[in-house]
Image: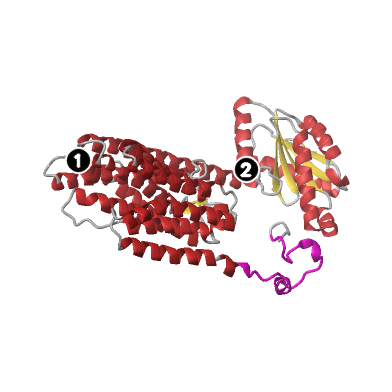
């Protein structure tokens, strides 16, 4: 492995010209001891989180201590993320700093709320959701449409299903119960933010990335935040007992900030994600459940709300879901077609010389003979064999032989007319088809090919002109017979076979 990949270790190719034992190289690598020290701030942060959340549970929301902890939490969140950036120095740091700004925005909303600017406070609170979503997606590098169209479409379908569920089962009942603005009715918009964050979670798990400690802390933090918000809203709709959710939401914030303090955050930010292209059973199940969300939710809403259903929201949800399903099908068909084209190219191209291979040669020879039969045009076929290739291969090694084959293929292809074809027939043999040509034309072309054969090498060739009726196999046999005649005559020459 090159030094640029393992800087500071013994793995440098320039240091060992002869084969050496890998265990000796590994033994020379320095022992990394900084990880034990670097994990201590993260452990201390978790201890602070437990003490803070337990203490918050014993304070009333309106008590001085409760108000103080409520205001302190977003500032602690920002301090934790910024501290993690300073300690671990991720590259790039921008997404983490964007996540840290969510705490400052939340503090601004609290100040506006305490000042009586309720509408402005709710607007600021709602802006935290997209801010967190964008920051987290950038942290895990999971927002690229071009890299993973399938994953983005699957995430969109699941998110639409979740959004429709929130609208029909949470937001619509809240709007019916609380109709005065700007108070609790504005809280009905919060589930939209939770759906956005739930979509981020789904996006996490449609990617193959590094699922380390920082990743799981962010995921659990987002999940707890969503659960805390919904648990606050549901007692306003249904006769549930209301519980203080501040410790739960504080724990969610501590976990997300703690992800920045853990050393694994550097790998999370710098690790390139890999799209998941295969349709696993779990992924198919999630997408199918999302597509069935609209009719199932209509049934659930009709039962729970005594026949009152929001047909507009359900209709829009169905249209959006079906549109996404159609896009997903188009994407799947496109992937299948791309794979088919790649397989076809591999099946008909020689990997070494990038010329058409024997299979492509056979198909093209039959096609061109059929075209010549229809139009009455002449066709010449030639077989080219590099002289003494085995001896050259023995003297220069297999890499030298491969270089000769590749160089000859490139040089010869540049000398042919656009309508001509040259293919690797097998080993050191090449086949050529000259459309609208006679044996005299083939002789001129072969002289050009001999002149540009690389590394001072020569070739022998045999050519035959189609007689107007013979099958491709017979034409090829005559060209092959001419090639062997050229070899017997001393090589480095072209022999032609007359028509029969």
Which residues fall within the magenta stretch? 6-34
Residue 486 vs residue 242: left or right?
Answer: right
Residue 411 vs residue 23: left or right?
Answer: right
Which one is closest to the eye, mark 1 or mark 2?
1
Magenta segment includes 308: no
Tag shown at residue 178: 1
Image x and y of residue 305, in percent: 14, 45
Judge by depth and name the residue closer to the eye, 127 or 71: 71
> Is residue 111 among the parts visible in the rendering?
yes
> Is residue 150 among the parts visible in the rendering?
no
Q: How many marks?
A: 2
> Which residue occupies 30% across, 41% down?
189
Magenta segment includes 26: yes
Question: Which is nearer the N-term, disc 1 or disc 2?
Answer: 1
The residue that label 2 is drawn on is: 360
In three-dimensional space, the C-alpha distance between marks 1 and 2, rounded to whole angstroms, equals 73 Å
Q: Quadrant of residue 329?
A: top left
> Is 302 above or below relative to 268?
above
Circle 2 crowding by C-alpha within 10 Å: few under 14, some 14–19, many from 20: some
Residue 45 vs residue 450: left or right?
Answer: left
Q: Quadrant of the N terminus?
A: bottom right
Q: Quadrant of residue 114?
A: top left
């Amino acid at each position: 492995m090159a030094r640029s990949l393992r800087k500071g270790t013994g793995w440098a190719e320039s240091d060992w010209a002869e084969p050496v034992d890998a265990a000796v190289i590994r033994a020379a690598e320095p022992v990394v001891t900084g990880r034990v020290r670097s994990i201590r701030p993260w452990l201390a942060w978790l201890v602070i989180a437990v003490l803070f959340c337990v203490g918050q549970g014993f304070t009333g929301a309106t008590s001085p201590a409760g108000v103080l902890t409520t205001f302190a939490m977003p500032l602690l969140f920002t301090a934790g993320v910024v501290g993690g950036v300073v300690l671990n120095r991720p590259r790039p740091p921008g997404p983490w700093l964007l996540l840290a700004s969510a705490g400052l925005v939340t503090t601004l909303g609290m100040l506006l709320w305490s000042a009586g600017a309720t509408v402005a406070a709710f607007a600021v609170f709602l802006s935290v959701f997209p801010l967190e979503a964008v920051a987290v997606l950038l942290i895990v590098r999971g927002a690229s449409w071009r890299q993973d169209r399938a994953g983005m479409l699957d995430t969109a379908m699941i998110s639409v299903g979740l959004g429709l569920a929130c609208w029909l089962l949470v937001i619509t009942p809240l709007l019916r119960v609380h109709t005065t603005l700007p108070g609790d009715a504005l809280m009905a918009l919060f589930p939209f933010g939770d759906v956005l964050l739930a979509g981020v979670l789904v996006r996490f798990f449609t990617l193959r990335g590094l699922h380390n400690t920082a990743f799981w802390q962010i995921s659990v933090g987002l999940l707890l935040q969503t659960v805390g918000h919904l648990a606050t809203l549901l007692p306003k709709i249904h006769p549930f007992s209301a519980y203080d959710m501040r410790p739960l939401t504080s724990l969610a914030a501590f976990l997300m900030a703690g992800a920045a303090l853990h050393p694994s955050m550097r790998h999370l930010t710098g690790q390139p994600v890999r799209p998941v292209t295969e349709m696993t059973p779990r992924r198919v199940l999630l997408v199918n459940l999302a597509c069935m969300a609209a009719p199932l939710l209509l049934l659930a809403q009709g039962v729970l709300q005594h026949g009152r259903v929001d047909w507009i929201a359900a209709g829009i949800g169905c249209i959006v879901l079906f549109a996404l399903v159609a896009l997903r099908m188009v994407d799947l068909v496109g992937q299948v077609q791309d794979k088919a084209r790649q397989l076809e190219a591999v099946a008909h191209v020689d990997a070494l010389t990038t010329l058409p291979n024997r299979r492509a040669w056979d198909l093209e020879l039959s096609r061109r003979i059929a075209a010549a039969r229809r139009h009455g045009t002449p066709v010449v076929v030639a077989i080219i064999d590099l002289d003494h290739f085995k001896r050259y291969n023995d003297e220069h090694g297999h890499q030298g032989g491969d270089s000769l084959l590749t160089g000859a293929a490139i040089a010869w292809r540049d000398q042919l007319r656009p309508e001509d074809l040259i293919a690797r027939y097998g080993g050191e043999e090449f086949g050529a088809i000259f459309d609208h040509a006679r044996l005299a034309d083939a002789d001129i072309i072969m002289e050009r090919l001999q002149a540009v054969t690389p590394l001072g090498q020569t070739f022998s060739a045999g050519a035959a002109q189609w007689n107007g009726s013979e099958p491709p196999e017979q034409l090829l046999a005559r060209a092959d017979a001419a090639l062997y005649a050229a070899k017997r005559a001393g090589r480095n020459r072209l022999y032609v076979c007359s028509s029969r």
